[in-house]
Amino acid sequence: MRKLIKAAGRLFGSASPEADYRRGLSAYDCEDYKTALEVWLSAGREGHSGAQYRLGRLYDLGKGVVRNAVDAVGWYRQAAEQGHGEAQARLAEIYYYGCEQPKGITPTDEALSLLFPNGLKIKQDYKEALRWARGAAEQGIVGAQAMLGYMYASGFGIDPDYAEAERWYRTAAEQGNAAAQLGLGTLLAGGYGGSSDPEAAHQWFRKAGEQDNIMAWYYLGTQYAAGMGVGQDYAEAAAWFQRAAKAGAVAAQRALGLLYMQGLGVPADAHAAETWLRKAAVQGDAEAMLRLGHLNSRGDGLQPNLLDAATWYRAAAELGHREAQKIIAQMYFAGTGVPRDEMEAVRWLERAAGQGDPQAQLRIGALYAEGRGVARDYDRALDWFRRAADQGNSDAVYNIGMLHSLGLGMPRDLKSAHLWYQRAAEQGSVLAQFRLGAMLAAGDGVPQDYAAAAVWSRKAAEQGHVGAMVNLGRFCMQGLGVPRDTAEAVRWLTAAAEQKEAAAMTALGELHGHWSDHKDFGQARGWLERAAALGDERAKTLLERMRVSPPSNLSEMDAGERPRAASEG
């Protein structure tokens, strides 16, 4: 019956949905949005997908109606369910990004509630976005193909699938879509699909750049700056960065500022650097803020201004920049550019630590262990040390060993200390290598093993640890764990003595007075006197023996003294 009524209406002069749709297009082109709305409503209610899509556009853009994403989505969905590709593509965008309520609208307004019972806001829905993007892409809508590539590449709402991302990006890119060309170039440059292909990436960036894609200009600059896919050319990089920076690309403004700071491709110019970095910083670029902090703290061609430096560091820190958080913490510790405030310093350091920065975790752990800026708390110190240790921070591993060794916040446990020291030593911690060598030599909590002690002491000594130099010198002097070698002993002990290490001077006194095959009591006395002057008790004892006994009896020195921790390090 309904079909008969429609047919009768057309017979007696009523317009068809297609005719209404075309009348709406003409009215729209003349900016007669009221007429366009009326005739499209008629056609849309009759099920014309084109009219339904156009109604969605009116509500989407706020032309002839109050802008309302909910009503826009309602009409888009009707068209999309009939297979309208452009409606599907726009639905995908709306669901992917969501649509906030227009500014200035009060949700509780009773009149608005009556006018818009479904509200004015669309929540993000990645599942719906993917559904509609795929539908539009499979119909050949190029923009949807590019968007589908982006969705698979970014992994928002779905698991990343770089092969699918590349397939859809390439499909759209080959049809000239600049966003897809940029996305495909990014995938190829980063090697997300397997191996990196920076040369191919460069070609796609150029194609996008030729369509005035600003980010493509930036990426071309990064390629020239890094020599990635092209010969390194800082002047060419600066040209591309400048083009993108003038168009407002924040990353390019920062990159250009850095080139001016370093004089790469452009003359070194601190003022130009500051200008471009500031442009990026005021748009919220945390890295640019950090660099402005560096520029103001060091000067680098400008008058140093620690107050401004602190301001920029704090701004970057507020945005979550871990390096800036650590720097502003140190400024509060030192009272540099800001009032000295250890509690504020701890606050910033703890924020960086909470973001997983291992150096900040190490430092905040040490502060809790020391009770500096916070109440002493060995449990919290251990927790932070463990977090840093789990990220491979060898100093944190060493500190856990120290807590076990000294029994701080836990029962003293030398066996556990030994395990932590060994782990840290194997990771390259000089302090742990020294401690491990001393423990093995003394047999503290572990079987005495001079050979192993000598190995670890040598590793630390070769990296400049004075206490390890003394212990290694004693091993060589007495032949403990290594062949007896007076010359080698003199070399290590002298190196430590030159750094004003009293224990090394005492050991040299013993070497010349007892252990050497060519004794020299004058040298022995000289070294012991120097050590005694620095407060070394053993040197004082040996000097007293020399005073009481003639030099011929110097062999009565305590030759059995084992190596000891010459310095706490």
Image: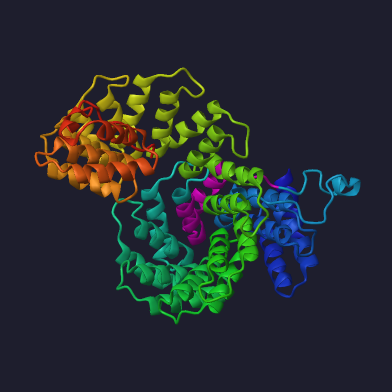
Q: Image quadrant of residue 110?
A: top right
Please report the residue visible at 16 percent of the width from the left and 32 percent of the height from the top.
Answer: 478
Colour style of the rendered protein structure: rainbow
Q: Image quadrant of residue 206?
A: bottom left
- Please, which residue is most extreme toward the right here? 110
Quarter of the image where the C terminus is located: top left
Q: Position of residue 150 (x, y in %)?
A: 47, 54
Q: Is residue 211 visible?
A: no
- Please, which residue is most extreme toward the top here? 411
> Magenta span covers which residues?
122-151
Quarter of the image where the N terminus is located: top right
User: In screen coordinates, is 79 left or right of 388?
Assistant: right
Please report the residue visible at 10 percent of the width from the left and 34 percent of the height from the top.
Answer: 483
Q: Position of residue 448 (x, y in %)?
A: 23, 22
Disc tally is: 0
39, 483: nearer the viewer: 483
Please report the residue visible at 21 percent of the width from the left and 46 percent of the height from the top.
Answer: 523
558, 112: nearer the viewer: 558
- Predominant secondary structure in magenta? helix
Is 235 placed above or below 19 here?
A: below
User: In screen coordinates, is 339 left or right of 472?
Assistant: right
Is 212 in the magenta?
Answer: no
Q: Position of residue 284 (x, y in %)?
A: 62, 61
Please report the residue visible at 52 percent of the width from the left and 65 percent of the height from the top.
Answer: 251
Q: Image quadrant of residue 166?
A: bottom left
User: In screen coordinates, is 63 left or right of 260?
Assistant: right
Is 148 in the magenta?
Answer: yes
Q: Position of residue 39 (x, y in %)?
A: 75, 62
User: In screen coordinates, is 108 left or right of 187?
Assistant: right
